[in-house]
Amino acid sequence: MSSLSEPTSAPATGREPILICYDDSPDAVRAIEAAAALFGPRRAVVLDVLPWMTGAESVAASSSIVPGTAFDDVNEAEARRIAGRGAEIARSAGFDAEPLGHLASATWTGIVDVADELEAAVIVIGSRGLTGVKRIVETSVSQQVVEHAGRPVLIVPPR
């Protein structure tokens, strides 16, 4: 963890987009609403990250996929579709929003990689509000993003 005197990224100029993580959940919608209230109208990229398709998933999906289609293309198209729904919500909240679907081995790495690529001013992510044993056992995407992002992260708690 860095100290306050050691910035981990360049200062924001106001032109950088905010990166809003969206997974089609009520918590993700709440994160968009909170970001709109805090940041007002500005450029935003709405991101959905899905995992690379495993071998077993590829076999299971093969019955509904046109022969010759790359399985990762199917996952990436699904991520773009989900991000598109989030971008619609973000636009209705006042953002100049564009959707982005991304594939990564771990969701948090995909979020951090895209934030770096975009030089995002802030990452906005909803929290599932895990408690007790679930919090210990399940890896928190939002916590991993905070630990690795090197930029401000707004975690919006569930209602």
Image (spheres, helix red, strand yellow):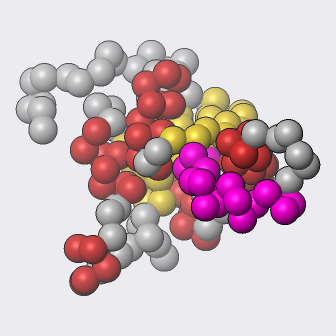
Query: Does the image show residue 40?
Result: no
Q: x and y percent of residue 128 in the render?
A: 44, 70
Q: Nearer the viewer, residue 71 or 11?
A: 71
Who is closer to the viewer here, 12 or 98? 98
Residue placed most toward the observer, 51 or 66: 66
Asked whether, in this view, residue 21 is left or right of residue 88, the answer is: left
Tell me the quarter of the picture where residue 8 sits: top left
Stretch in magenta: 48-64
Above or below 103: residue 115: above
Which quadrant holds residue 137? Answer: bottom left
- Taking the view exactly as shown, the residue that stands out farthest to the bottom is 132
Circle count:
0
At a point 85% along the width and 39% down the height, the residue shown is 68
Asked if the stretch drawn in magenta spans residue 50, the answer is: yes
| Residue ID at (34%, 61%) | 140
Q: Measuring 75% from the left and 60% from the top, which residue is drawn there? A: 61
